[in-house]
Image (cartoon, rainbow, N blue to C red):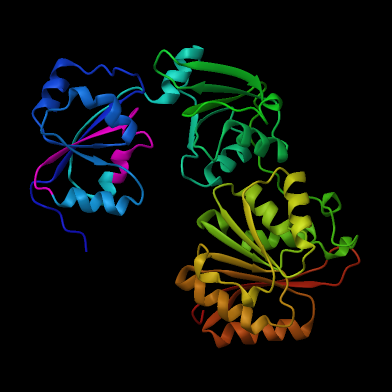
Amino acid sequence: MKHHNSGLSFIVLGMNDEEAPQFSADLQALIAQHRIFSGGRRHRELVAALLPEDALWIDITVPLEDVYAQYRQHDAPVVVFASGDPLFFGFTTTLMREFPGRVERTVPSFSSLQMLAHALRLPYHDMYVVSLTGRPWHEFDRALIERRAKVGVLTDKKHTPSVIAQHMLDYGYEGYTMHIGVLLGGERQETYSLPLEEVPGRDFAHPNCLILEHKAPTQYAAPLGLKELDFFPLNGRVNMITKMPIRLVSLSLLELEQRRCLWDVGFCTGSVSIEAKLRYPHLHVQSFEIRPEGDELMQTNSRRFHAPGIDYLIGDFLQQDLERLPRPEAAFIGGHGGHLQEFVERLTALMGERGVLVFNSVSTETLDNFRAAVASVGWHISYETLLAVDQHNPITILQAKPGQG
């Protein structure tokens, strides 16, 4: 339970990375009137001369829980120094979440992306912004799949311009110029504008940020129906790939436009995962395959179809530690190795009341087994259709949902 002292509040002052930060006279007076201050160690160095003699400083370091505990020891306002615009992927958002209603005032400085845009004289009202500062690739990958023409990216020491450029090239996202801003807002500021292909392997001083600009942007249109012959198959067995018509009906029944996380169990070549990710870039896709060949198949095919951001695990699904993974809201069973009952039990237990499960049955035996498994967990078959493609055996596509129907 979080306890807030009645007098605890926060004033957040944005600042840049200049050696002698310039604050207005009223902000300097505000600083002089307070005693408790907080910020990164770099901020403390920059503002030390402005603080009153009896100032108490709380370093913002990880784990943040320790910082919050120090804040709660006080019954007075805390002046927090933050980089750039504190409401733009900034620390104010974190404070508002941890201390609701306690942020009294925020004062913005220019964000690093604003400064880079002005250094380039590049209008940025149409820029899509993504943060990779301590965050995963998901939103960045979404911007790529959606073919955003101008993307502002906040970086960190792990997601460097070089690493980001290589990630883009690995998945075939070419034709971009990468504008890189280094140590923006001071005398040491540097900017670079390079073709994406020239960035991997180059080092840039930190902190930095970047703007990706496509030379010839195109209107994004998600593909509808990836041809199975375009996939790199399992051991040359093209018939192991879910046929396009079957895949499209299955994806429709997964109702992914309403959901945030899909599990593809038994992904084989990755066709269902890849088409789902391209069609619904907001989606978190978690895939599973027991065969070790799945590693090469997913890497090859996701790059072939420009589909970054698919997380996958190789090994027995029933032996995986599923609790640490994002919970599925939809699941597709593409292979079960004779353990259909156990798969249905685990997946339905994880999905809960809003879940949806889709399965393609190739035989009467598996059809009966799936129906029985669904009934045993208190779910029902909500849709069923028989579909035949060319000379292949007819396949029953089934959708299951919670409840008795």
Q: In this view, does 46 lie to the left or right of 226?
A: left
Specify whether residue 88 is painted magenta.
Answer: yes
Q: Which of 236 and 218 is in front in this view?
A: 236
Q: Judge whether residue 30 is colored magenta.
A: no
| Left or right, residue 238 beside residue 166 | right
The one of 402 and 189 positioned closer to us in this rendering: 189
Residue lying at 67% horizontally and 26% vertically, measured from the top left: 196
Residue at 11% x, 29% y: name it. 53
Q: Nearer the viewer, residue 339 or 389?
A: 339
Q: Position of residue 222 (x, y in %)?
A: 66, 42
**In the image, is residue 313 above or below residue 71?**
below
Q: Is residue 124 above or below residue 292?
A: above
Of residue 18 and residue 390, the one placed in the foreground of this image is: 18
Image: magenta residue range: 74-94
Left of 89 or right of it: where is 73? left
Q: Would residue 401 be visible to someone looking at this image?
A: no
Q: Is residue 383 above or below residue 180?
A: below
The residue located at (51%, 13%) in the rendering is 120
Where residue 310 appears, as percent x and y from the top left, is 64, 53
The quadrant holding residue 401 is bottom right
State the image quarter where residue 271 is shown. bottom right
Q: Position of residue 82 (x, y in %)?
A: 30, 32
